[in-house]
Image (cartoon, coloured by chain):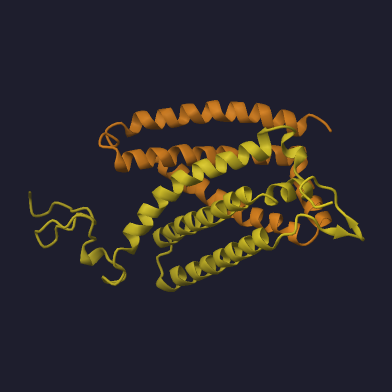
Amino acid sequence: MWSWVGHRITGVVIFFFLLVHVLDTSLVRVSPEAYTAVIGAYKNPLMALGETGLVAAIVFHAFNGLRIIAVDFWKKGAKYQRQMLWVVLGLWVVTMVAFAIRHLSLALGGH
Amino acid sequence: MSATEIQPPRSGQIGGKPESGKIAPKYRRNGNSRGNFEMLAWLFMRLSGVVLVVLIFGHLIVNLLVGEGIHAIDFGFVAGKWADPFWQFWDLAMLWLAMLHGTNGVRTIINDYAEKDSTRFWLKMVLYAASAVIIILGTLVIFTFNPCPVVDGVQLPGGFCPA
């Protein structure tokens, strides 16, 4: 039940980011300066944390989505759905620790 | 089975005959006019989901984790990618699949929580309009983009640009 709630919430968050992300990327069609100015907003420390949160939402939605597919199409999917949720959460933690170390050290590491 | 046992809405056993996957008439909002659209939408979510995991993880790795990561992203970075048909196609597929997947997901959520017919209708119209604008805009940007613009009479540098 909570994985279902989490899937909905992360899905909506990702969808609204996607709308904004297509709009900001579309600025390449306006001018190089316009794009570079707006994309600069993604490069401050606060946004680095926001990006990490967004990626956390994406990775959970991705792994839990694969679990949903397994429940629907794999013969034993429904039987092992609880174990698969723990696998999802485990892989999510490992992936996010690795991503956060890499992304935050790049984003916060000066320049 | 006792007479008072509650049937799940999708059991379809109202008439005594099991019809798997069919929603019993009294739980239907739109009569029977939708054919198997909902089943195709359900299937689309799973198929596009698998492809999107690959496309988006690839997108995040190439744009955020390789080399200088986010610091490398500027106009030249995008221009360099879209000078290559491979990345044009990658981003186009990602745009269309993600937008259709997300639009169908939000459509499901609106159908679940907006109980009034008119509210549900207008929320979905706003959703479809926003999605159409974003898909068309994104597609036009990917295909009409010039990676080698001339700014103030000077060709911007880029290894992918003709000298």
Q: Where's the C terminus of chain A, which quadrant?
A: top right
Compare residues A105 and B93 and report the one nearer the observer: B93
Residue A54 visible at all: no
Q: Residue at x 21, y 66 (%)?
A: B25
Q: Residue at x 35, y 28 (%)?
A: A83
Residue A38 drawn at (x, y percent): 78, 52
Compare residues A90 and B77 and report the one nearer the observer: B77
**A54 in relation to B150, above or below:** above
Q: Residue at x 65, y 38 (%)?
A: B62
Image quadrant assignment for residue B142: bottom right
Compare residues B62 and A40 and report the one nearer the observer: B62
Extreme residue toward the front, this view: B163
Q: Is residue A68 left or right of residue A102?
A: left
Residue B36 drawn at (x, y percent): 30, 63
Q: Residue at x 29, y 67 (%)?
A: B35
Residue A78 drawn at (x, y percent): 28, 37
Task: Tell which chain the image draws in yellow.
Answer: B
Instruction: Tell me the shade of chain A.
Output: orange
Q: Is residue A75 left or right of residue B54?
A: left
**B6 in relation to B60, above or below:** below
Q: Is residue A62 left or right of residue B117?
A: right
How many labels sit on residues? 0
Q: Where's the N terminus of chain A, which quadrant?
A: top left
Residue A18 drawn at (x, y percent): 60, 53
Image quadrant assignment for residue B65: top right
Residue B125 visible at all: yes
Compare residues A85 and A21 and report the one nearer the observer: A21
Q: Is residue B81 left or right of residue B26?
A: right
